[in-house]
Image (tube, grey):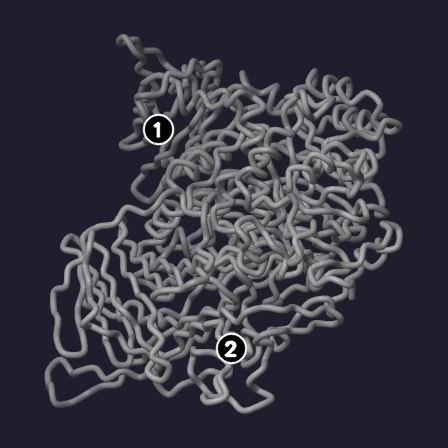
């Protein structure tokens, strides 16, 4: 150890590179090595020691407040209950009074939630009932022991503290008389159990000195056995029961080559859990940024049920329940209960609190080519030209840390990149972009302007002795910007301006990496918990917010760079609740192995249902060398996932799409081109994610909440509610078992238009050339009829509609258009949002938002209608002003597909196509 708590060893970069890029899980704690988890696990009262003091009840401005008193210590806590508009309940538990305040998470909520009036409808000895007059839920509070029960339409929904596991440590020195080591939870363990890292905690050679401040609370979800959420873990989408000494860990860490099917936390955290059953969906948001562990226990219980005809006879009914226990190292209890009742209601409720997905620029939905590292300007030019030579579209090439001057961010290596502006202008001519990396660690170098200025302003994280914290990362000795300080964030955002970021242009965008933060040769390879941030808060209190704040500052910097006119693009590795407001997320350092392709699907589904729609995994796997089959299958899966980027580690074989033989190049070309033809659909999905909080990539249970067969499915998924994607995730596959969800649904092969028989499950033949994709009956998908070298070449590309009829012969869909890059859609209503409806053999084009006034430059050329039963005698379009004209058509009676071509219809105006 160093001579000061809060510092770490800083070996030279070459010394630590081997240890950094080593899959060593012993660098990270198990649950049994986490002190506050062991202390809370050791606390298992027969009943809660807390009593609600009903005589302290106070209702003011619709907020209900009362005291909770520990029966042994008599230390009071303050409970606040809020009814938040939109069917949300908020519970806060904090010290009733304190000399030393506890950290409460700032900036994650988009605003202070709007509350509604809570009324006491029934106050009796030992209990009370709270309700909001316009809502169907009630809160039943029991005083001794303290617990809450939330009912909806008089049915049990969520219990709080029914297991008595409310836990709230207070940092007081143990008294000789009491023998207690903390005032709460009031248990009196005997030595040596009383320690468990209470005042100091050692891991390997690192000693963490601290005050005990852990909090915890239990919840029971009545009738629920399907729970989801809590990213980021390389595990199944549906949360599994946790064992005696394991829990889902939310603690942002740089886990190189992370283990799969593991509950250990990786790069980011969203403390949101979703629960679903046939009749209801709800959620729990635990707003705490310290290290958090979550236990999940689903079980079935027998509940008496009165017989309908003979009341004196009881039947036993099996009721599934899921117990959830949240445990955090510090902070307060601040929890939101999202009461649903439907999946999309929960998504809207969460977005109401933390914001929706930022609406990205169109180029970022194209294909991205990345590598650690493209060596120099000649390499960039060669790769860029290679896409043109092989007729493969792409939009963005990426530069990793080696493009800088000695790992000094906002600089360029003068030998490898002597003319960065010319390089960017060459990309601009081809309507492409550049993304470069900018990490939070700053090389300790007094001659480095960024470092010198930040040091002078006091903008680095400190040690407990007030010195700048120094750790080790890619540049060697590094200091870390304190992004929790608003002044630091504002200063950092100005570094992206053209006058400060020399040789940058407006085609350059940003990638935030290593922002957990990663600190080599430090406890768990991250910042020591006793490091000190703005306002004196310790790192342990806010660890999971660090990457959130860097991405926030970066995003705001790019917006400021454009004078507030252009949408930013920022990719981050570390994230928290609310990160969706600032850009995209990827799943970090995966491996070029089939198991990592497989686990990428549930990982992305979990991110998607917790607000982060713009997510993806490194195509091909970051670590190692994929064979041709794995690479092709990963491109096929990645092209149907929101963020589509290939990336590879330093020292791996080059793997540009044309390096695996002409047959595989042809397949990958077709995959990427198909992505580009679908860009209108992708853009629509992202607009709806921004506008309505709808996930882009959806697990089947979200789209088919009444179909229990899909609740555990995470190898297939939906894009919007229209496309079913079944990626091939294993080698050598020649057939795939596909579940066609829902009952009475019509499905069609997306590429061939043939209808799928009514069987709920089917074995589908597959080849290496493509993965199965199906269009749902009742949907209309907008597409381009051709592709360009990048999205920038496609603004005039014609459109087509693929219409899949449901069993009633109807379908509906939309298209959204704007300039693809600015905020004019928001400020000047420069957008075109259209709705297409097919019913009774008429296709209608109408406005989905009449405020839009964007001048569309493209036409609708083709319409394909799947499931059309008879060849028509005539097809006529009715246009604005009363004009009519006959349309040419063809009909495939085998597939029952009607095709209309060469329409030349203005996609932005009302018209009708009548089929006789």
**Along the polypeptide, which appears first: circle 2 or circle 1?**
2
Q: Say above or below: 346 vs 29.
A: above
**What mark, if any, has residue 173 been given in the picture?**
2
Does dot 2 land on a helix, a strand or a loop? loop
x, y percentage for residue 764? 57, 54
Q: Nearer the viewer, residue 605 or 160?
A: 160
Does dot 1 land on a helix, a strand or a loop? strand
- Choose top left, top right, bottom left or bottom right for residue 881: top left
Q: Is residue 757 left or right of residue 848?
A: right
Q: Say above or below: 793 vs 260.
A: above
**Residue pictured at 35% horizontal, 28% vertical:** 835
**What mark, if any, has residue 835 been given in the picture?**
1
x, y percentage for residue 848? 32, 27
**Residue pictured at 68% horizontal, 30% vertical:** 396
Q: Are marks 2 and 1 in contact (CB under 8 Å)?
A: no
Does residue 759 show up? no
x, y percentage for residue 191? 58, 90
């Amino acid at each position: 150890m160093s001579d000061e708590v809060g510092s770490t060893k800083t070996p030279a970069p070459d010394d630590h590179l081997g240890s950094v890029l080593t899959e060593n899980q012993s660098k990270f704690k198990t649950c049994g090595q986490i002190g506050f988890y062991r202390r809370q696990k050791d606390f298992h009262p027969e009943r809660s020691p807390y009593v609600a003091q009903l005589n302290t009840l106070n209702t003011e401005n619709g907020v209900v407040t009362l005291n909770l008193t520990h029966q042994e210590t008599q230390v009071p806590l303050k409970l606040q209950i809020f009814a938040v508009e939109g069917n949300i309940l908020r519970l806060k538990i904090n010290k009733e009074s304190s000399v030393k305040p506890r950290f409460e998470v700032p900036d994650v909520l988009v605003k202070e939630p709007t509350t509604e009036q809570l009324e006491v409808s029934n106050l009796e000895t030992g209990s009370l009932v709270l309700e909001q007059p316009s809502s169907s839920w009630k809160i039943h509070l029991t005083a001794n022991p303290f617990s809450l029960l939330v009912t909806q339409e008089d049915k049990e929904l969520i219990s709080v503290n029914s297991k008595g596991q409310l836990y709230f440590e207070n940092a007081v020195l143990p008294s000789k008389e009491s023998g207690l080591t903390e005032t709460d939870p009031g248990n009196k363990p005997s030595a040596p159990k009383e320690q468990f890292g209470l005042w100091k905690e050692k891991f390997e050679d690192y000693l963490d000195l601290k005050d005990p401040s852990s909090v915890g609370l239990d919840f029971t979800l009545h009738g629920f056995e399907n729970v989801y959420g809590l990213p980021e873990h390389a595990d199944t989408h549906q949360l599994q029961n946790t064992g005696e000494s394991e829990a889902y860990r939310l603690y942002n860490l740089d886990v190189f080559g992370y283990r799969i099917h593991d509950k250990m936390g990786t790069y980011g955290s969203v403390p949101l859990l979703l629960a679903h059953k046939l009749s209801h969906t709800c959620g729990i948001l635990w707003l705490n940024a310290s290290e958090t562990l979550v236990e999940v226990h689903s079980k079935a219980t027998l509940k008496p049920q009165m017989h309908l005809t003979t009341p004196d006879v009881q039947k036993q009914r099996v009721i599934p329940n899921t117990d959830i226990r949240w445990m955090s190292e510090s902070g307060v209890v601040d929890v939101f209960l999202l009461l649903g009742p439907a999946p999309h209601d929960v998504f809207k409720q969460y977005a109401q609190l933390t914001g929706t997905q930022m609406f990205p620029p169109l180029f970022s939905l194209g294909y991205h080519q990345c590598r650690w590292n493209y060596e120099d300007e000649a390499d960039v030019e060669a790769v860029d030209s290679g896409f043109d030579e092989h007729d493969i579209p792409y939009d963005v090439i990426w530069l990793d840390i080696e493009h800088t001057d000695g790992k000094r961010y906002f600089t360029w290596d003068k030998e490898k990149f002597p003319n960065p502006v010319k390089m960017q202008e060459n990309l601009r001519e081809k309507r492409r972009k550049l993304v470069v990396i900018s990490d939070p660690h700053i090389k300790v170098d007094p001659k480095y302007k960024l470092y010198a200025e930040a040091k002078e302003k006091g903008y680095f994280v400190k040690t407990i002795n007030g010195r700048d914290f120094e750790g080790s990362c890619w540049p060697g000795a590094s200091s870390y910007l304190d992004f929790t300080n608003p002044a630091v964030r504002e200063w950092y955002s100005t570094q992206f301006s053209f006058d400060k970021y020399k040789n940058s242009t407006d085609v350059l965008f940003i990638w935030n990496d290593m922002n957990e933060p990663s600190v080599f040769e430090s406890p768990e390879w991250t910042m020591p918990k006793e490091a000190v941030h703005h306002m004196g808060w310790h790192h342990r209190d806010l660890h999971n917010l660090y990457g959130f704040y860097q991405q926030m500052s970066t995003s705001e910097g790019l917006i400021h760079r454009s004078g507030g006119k252009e949408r930013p693009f920022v990719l981050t590795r570390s994230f928290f609740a609310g990160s969706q407001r600032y850009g995209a997320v990827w799943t970090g350092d995966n491996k070029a192995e089939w198991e990592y392709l497989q686990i990428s699907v549930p990982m992305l589904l979990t991110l998607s249902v917790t607000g982060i729609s713009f997510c993806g995994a490194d195509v091909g796997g970051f670590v190692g060398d994929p064979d041709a089959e794995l690479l092709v299958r990963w491109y096929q899966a990645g092209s149907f996932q929101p963020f589509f980027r290939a990336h590879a580690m330093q020292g791996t074989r080059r793997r540009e799409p044309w390096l695996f033989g002409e047959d595989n190049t042809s397949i990958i070309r077709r995959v990427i081109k198909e992505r580009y033809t679908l860009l209108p659909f992708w853009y629509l999905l992202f607009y709806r994610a921004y506008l309505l909080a709808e996930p882009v990539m959806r697990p089947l249970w979200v789209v088919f909440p009444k179909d229990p067969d899909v609740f555990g499915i995470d190898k297939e998924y939906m894009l919007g509610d229209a496309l079913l994607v079944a990626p091939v995730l294993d080698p050598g596959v020649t057939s795939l078992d596909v579940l066609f969800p829902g009952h009475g649904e019509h499905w069609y092969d997306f590429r061939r238009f043939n209808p799928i028989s009514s069987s709920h499950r089917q074995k589908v033949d597959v080849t290496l050339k493509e993965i199965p994709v199906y269009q749902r009956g009742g949907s209309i998908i907008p597409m381009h009829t051709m592709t360009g070298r990048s999205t920038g070449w496609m603004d005039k590309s014609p459109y087509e509609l693929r219409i899949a009829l449901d069993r009633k012969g109807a379908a509906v869909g939309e298209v959204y258009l704007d300039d693809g890059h600015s905020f004019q859609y928001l400020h000047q209503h420069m957008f075109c949002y259209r709705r297409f409806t097919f019913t009774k053999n008429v296709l209608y084009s109408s406005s989905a938002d009449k405020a839009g006034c964007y001048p569309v430059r493209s036409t609708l050329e083709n319409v394909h209608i799947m499931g059309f039963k008879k060849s028509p005698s005539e097809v006529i379009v009715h246009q604005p002003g009363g004009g009519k004209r006959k349309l040419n058509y063809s009909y495939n009676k085998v597939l029952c597909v009607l095709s209309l071509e060469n329409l030349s219809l203005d996609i932005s105006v009302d018209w009708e196509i009548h089929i006789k």
